[in-house]
Amino acid sequence: MIKRFLAFAFLCALFTTIQAQDCTLTFKGKITDFHDNTPIIGASVQIIGINKFTSSNMDGLFEFKNLCAQKIELEIKHISCDTKRLTIDITKNFYKEIFLEHHLNELNEVVVKATSKAAITSIEKSLKKDNLNNFSDKSLGDALNTLSGVSSLNTGNSIVKPMIHGLHSSRLLLINNNVRMFDQEWGDEHAPNIDINANEKVSVIKGANSLKYGSDAIGGLVLIQPKKYAVKDSLFGNLATSFNSNGLGGNINSEIVKTYASGFYAKIQANYKQFGDFKSPNYILTNSGLKSINTSLRIGYNTYEKGLSAYYSFVNNQFAILQSSHIGNVNDLVNAINSQQPRVIEDFSYNIDFPKQTINHHLGKIEGYKRFKNLGKLSVQYDVQLNRRKEFDLRRGNRSNIPVVDLRLFTNTLQANLELETLDNLKLETGFLVRYQQNDAVSGTGTSALIPDFDKYELGIFSVADYKLNESTAISAGLRYDFSKIDAKKLYNITDWNETFNYDELFPEFETGVINGTRVFTNPNYTFHNFSTSLGFSKRLHQDVSLLANYGLASRIPNPSELFSDGLHHSAARIEIGLLTIEKEIANKFMLSLEKVNTNFGYSISPYYKHINGFIQLVPVGITTTIRGAFPVWEYQQINAQIFGVDIDVNKQIAKKFFYKGNISLLQGDNLSEEKALIHMPSTNFTNTISYTNEKLNRLTLQVNHKTVLQQNRFPDYNFYTFNATTQQNVFVDISTTPPTYSLFNFYSSATFKTANKATLKLAFSINNIFNVAYRENLNRLRFFADEVGRNFNLKLNYNF
């Protein structure tokens, strides 16, 4: 009897439980585009773990019936969207609006195309990852030098500064991973501390459209961008190495990337590069090697709606500087100019001796973004940089290991941008930044600091807009305001302060005291207000032909070297003098471009004109004698200047597998104040490349390249006479006449082989300067002392897995 009662009670409880499980609930939803709320049709919706599927209708609506009260996981897929998963707790009839990103390119791995631009109306050229791989053992400046309108200011063959239309250093903005580089770019021999192996794409923006990054891009903008990763589970990487016969060195680079379907990703990359002494056609370039270690780390979470990422990179460069360029006085310079060979020629060595540079550069950033419905994307970024530059010279008394220049620059920036995305034809971006810089002239060098201690404060606000008038016409406009303050501390010789420069009358407010009656302690303070603007226009004249026009008003405040330099710049072997009277530069820039983007036959013709009021130039003004001997004196001056020219690019498919590509750059720079040519302007140069490509034969590529640089016949005459103590005579020093024309031929070949598991191995072999031509380049600061590098055989292996 008891057993029957218990069985009855159990059945009643079970019945009651089944009755309590409510499986009559309905879940309805709507799937729309995050951008514009338009319904997404045909998206598949699945409840994970339950065999229930449906899809969105013409209105983006879907529905599930007869659901039990429980927690479910939804998976929503659409061919043009990224797959999305949601967890929903169903306790009653439920409705939810779900947003999908209908622009997959924002998230997925992007195939970089030559036509992709930073802005609709921008005039720019880009280097793809394949192009950058060809320069894996070279510098950023070497890679950019292949683009029309871009040249370089070299110190030997290792220190390469990019120039755009004859302008360099602080007139160029270098944006690395959305961080403006501050690595003491003011010196002619200060190259950017950027590892091109860590990045996916480099763009040179010659026209306007740079206000988002700064107001002082008088020369242009170099935009260095990392790769974007697909939101999926994946593990891939790359191992690349190269070997060069000239310098008997090369590099090895490796990176590995892990991505997750959840949106998380991580990447680590490292590069090591080393070269010994390079060789010109006729002799060893003693003490010209380099050693470089670079590493970077990226981690983040990336979805269309929100994301957070962190990035860190470290660059350690050691550059040997040609030993023959170390001059004790101006007579050494005379002897170098009159001699056809370097003063020092020794056997090959990997040693990096004196003079040399060592630079450490740390860069870190944290960035987050969030998209708000019916508003747009808000991004906030904080970045910090620490640059330590040491320059070593050959010194007496075993003091060579003590740097003669030791500068530490600390920069940190907070910036926020808002991209409004609510209007179909209008893209509006506005933002602000706050930046603080501190320069520390590290004590203990035993020399006077070339650049003093200073603090610099910056505040900037900008707004730029792109508007599509119709399918073929677009305009852009931008406005930016910047406030800057420089607070420095510097000692002056009292004779220079009172008599040479008359600063005691011009800037009495800077004086804070006199030391021992011989030196004046000062506290220079400057504030600047900059307004900049840009206008752009683009018109598609035909299916593949476009006309672009850009105007930009840019302002650049003087950098501390132009204001405060005072002493011997050892690596440049000259006295450099800055002036407290230097004011900001103001430039008006005009640029046109007619472009035809077509594989069979394409071209771009881009004339430009720049008028710069208060152009700051560093020019030789005489000779002075120190306890080490006589040195040339270079002084910063302000003039009015103009630069104009044209860049022309052409590509043509000659036959089915044969292609031609060429470009020419013509430029003229004028010192309008003194009616003569500007110093250090690149001469006319042109390149021609014929290539054979066979995709079916392991992507075989054979390429012959030719480059000619004509002699620069327009140069200012800064020659001078000096007394030679050895010969007891006045001698003529020709530092102005430019080297003659030269032509170089190069060869490149590559093939790609498939290996296991979709991995590929690319082999590349190239010869630079095939005919071992001896030449000197006008824009190489060491052209007085030695020829350029001779023939080089290069072998590269690139394994992608």
Image (cartoon, helix red, strand yellow):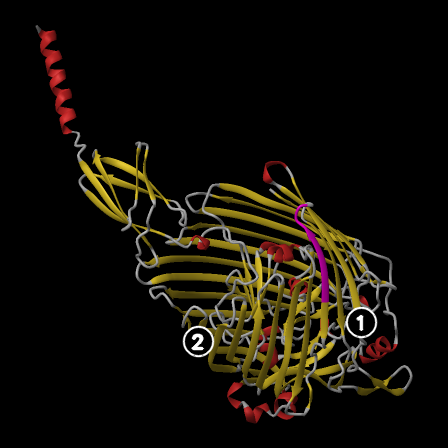
Q: Is residue 684 magenta?
A: no
Q: Position of residue 282 (x, y in %)?
A: 88, 64
Q: Please give the residue where the numbered disc 2 appears in the rendered image.
A: 477
Tag 1 residue: 742
At label 2, the amino acid type is Ala
Please, what is the three-letter code of the amino acid marked with disc 1?
A: Tyr
* Quarter of the figure with residue 722: bottom right
Of the numbered discs 2 and 1, the one sitting upstream in the chain is: 2
Distance, label 2 to label 1, CA atoms, is 42 Å
Q: Dot 1, crowdedness within 10 Å: few (<14), some or many (≥20)?
A: some
Q: Specify start and end residues of the magenta stretch as a single range.
A: 688-696
Q: Describe residue 669's horizontal placement relative to residue 739 as left or right.
A: left
Report the residue at 69% width, 54% height from top: 657
Picture layout, residue 118 above or below residue 583? above
At x 61% / y 92%, what residue is drawn? 502
Provide residue 484's location: percent of width, then percent of height.
Answer: 47, 77
